[in-house]
Image: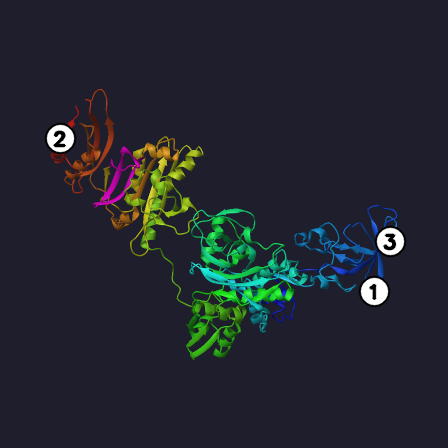
Amino acid sequence: MLVSVKWLRDYVDIDMDVKEFADMMTMTGTKMETVEYFGEDIENVVVGKILEINPHPNADKLIVTKVDAGEKVLQIVTGAKNVKVGDYIPLAIHGAKLPGGIKIKTGKLRGEVSEGMMCSAAELGIDEKYVEEYKKNGIFLLDYEDSYETGKDVKEVLGINDAVIDFELTSNRPDCRCVIGIAREAAVTVGKKVKYPEVSVKEEADESIDFDVQIENPELCRRYAARIVKDVKIAPSPYWMQRRLIEAGVRPINNIVDITNYVMLEMGQPMHAFDLSDIGTGKIVVRNAEEGEKFVTLDEQERTLDKDMLVITNGEKSLALAGVMGGLNSEIKDTTTELLFESANFQAENVRATSKKLGLRTESSSRFEKGIDPNLAELAVNRAAQLVEMLGAGKVLKGIEDNYPSKPEQKILTVNPKRITARLGIDLPIAQFIEILESLEFDCDLKSAEELEIRVPSFRLDMEQEADVLEEIARIYGFENIPAKQLEGNYTAGIKTERQKFNDILKSTALSTGLYEVLSYSFVSPSGVDKIKLPADSPKRNFVKLLNPLGEETSVMRTTMIPNMLDIVYTNMSRKNPEFAGFECGHVFVPSEEGLPSELNHMCMAMYGKEVDFFVLKGAVEKVLERAGMKKYEIIPEKENTTFHPGRCAKIVCNGTLVGYLGEVHPDVLENYGLTQRVYVCEIDTDVVFENSDRTIIFKSLPKYPSTSRDIALTVKDEVYVKDIEDIIKANGEGLVESYRLFDVYRGSQIETGYKSVAYSITYRSAEKTLTDDDIAPVHENILKELSEKLGAELRA
């Protein structure tokens, strides 16, 4: 926020260097961004009065003038077209300096002596956006007053002899977004008292206000105050007011509009002025807009409103967007003779939402959306009326219309001064403690050494708890005065939890199998579950929704990691990456009827490539589960999961609990993601894996006795799974089967249609002796018998 030090001095005695003052403000919490010194590059530029103008004898486009410079009359040659006899102008005399390092000295122009230079706005460093049209292409005429003292320093006349400080304000201090708010902070910083402006209104005694204000939604409009001014005279505002607006970055318009902007900058209360003749009904009605209502704002743009927006109306038509911008249909015009000043208080969240939806941000909305003290409304409208009378811009009618449905109670905080000073590590007497708070305009009532009751002023919207009071004490006492201390406490070595160690095992094992780790956001689009073809009744469609998402693509918390992984697969495939194998360990979120949603740990793998198939993925999954210590699990064929290809999908089950799914992605899902190759995906619930894992490692001695192996080739029906064969081998090994390995599956002309040949190598070993054929034969025969009886398997000749 830009604050003129000259304006600030009206309310606080600041008798120190501006830079020193700005640094002190930074140390008490009002951070200074920059300090700009107006006029510091200007020297020997004075007020001059044109006494005589004559044509240049040797140049048609130049004129020769006589200018009263105070101590003497100078001859000035110029080409300006906007000057006349009697004009007061800024005159740079011999030896003058101007912004940009320009130096002025006496010289000749086409044979005529020129003892200086008349200055334009640009040459004085004044931004032309604040300059009237008739001054832009010529000399900056001094016409704000009837006459000026010739020879006087032009910096003093134009008020460009001071500094402007740009303060960086935090969002929790909306009370500082005005000159008086900064003055309060400045006063406590330099140890002075604030000199508030004395607001008194000289009213027209013969006529009282006759106007009605109705508030239909007191939750969104907490207060609305109005005053009426008649016999309005629209004219430029005085230069002192224009200058203050300019230094705050606001363009002067006319006396009435400038008054509303002046009050906003001075007190922090946005205001608006309506042409009373455009209201017509004698009342203001504050209501919600109608859905789809059209409204043209002051910037001549038509806006489409919705039912959540608040509008100010005359009961028949909308006149303004509450807290954002007025309407074109009731603006102050050169012909305005009667006006209504409004000063209202609107809900911050509603103004912010309206401004965001319409893409319309103004000085007014930026203040309302951070919060404004409702008690400011009456004071501000009275200040505006006072300025009208002071400038002779109109007559203020007697009385004020003030609709204030529910006045909030004063906020009271009870704090423990001893606890606060102990936490700060300072020895602060209670008297000084209270003195600091009272300098910030808090009312204090000391109940005991450990109990202080504080009445918070209405403008301090940020004060909520004891921690806020601690901050106030710390910043005013001075952070630089709080002694530094070494940290105290017991030092302990940081160690990972069992769960963290388990996650490290999962990741390191996945990396060892050739997968790369990837990361994706937990905020996703709800359309992801449609793209992976989840059924309409799937519980994974029940999302945790964000209240204020950045957009539709990040509006919910994910319930499955597969859409994220397929997006990553698409990125690799679209960039012509011939193969990909990746995994992610992350979280999914399940809503809860009570309390916070559940945050579950999942692991997702995906791969594609020339050498990749279902069994490559299955091998990687088995390796991860084996290393994680999960032993008693089954991989069962699954045909009902719509995300995966029918017949190329399996589910992982442990002790009757579903661990996850793996398989080839369904062709329709591939099409939804624009994928042109077969993709294999797995998602497992690592919480279930953790609960069912046994990572105890039991070492066995090396076998003393040799092993022997037998190969068998079985003819079975196509629908028989090799898992069923392996279960029978394992169940009938009688402690002698050390391992088994599938090494061939054959279908062809030598095998009957509907059958396949499956070949296994079975290894036998005993820990107690060397096995003989007599030891192995009965076990081997029993395995073949069980395979025949249960699966219809026959030894292939």
Q: Earlier in the sequence, mark 1 or mark 2?
A: 1
Location of mark 1 (residue): 71
| Occupied quadrant, residue 735 | top left
Q: Is residue 484 visible?
A: no
Location of mark 3 (residue): 113
Marks 1 and 2 in Cβ contact (< 8 Å): no
Foreground label between 1 and 2: 1
Q: Is residue 158 visible?
A: yes
Label 3: element kind? strand
Comparing 501 with 478, the one in front is: 478
Question: What segment is highlighted magenta in the picture?
Answer: 638-664
Q: Main secondary structure of the magenta part?
A: strand
In the picture, the quarter occupied by the N terminus is bottom right
Q: Earlier in the sequence, mark 3 or mark 1?
A: 1
The image's colouring method is: rainbow
> Is 698 on the left or on the right of 792, as rendered?
right
**Amino acid type indicated by mark 2:** Ser
Location of mark 2 (residue): 788
Label 2: element kind? helix
Q: Is residue 123 above or below residue 176?
A: above
Q: Which residue is drawn at the image coordinates 56% and 49% (left, top)? A: 299
Between the C-alphas of marks 3 and 2, the distance is 126 Å
Comparing 345 with 349, the one in front is: 345
Comparing 161 with 409, the one in front is: 409
Instruction: Find residue 390 and report its horizontal and vertical position in percent.
Output: 63, 66
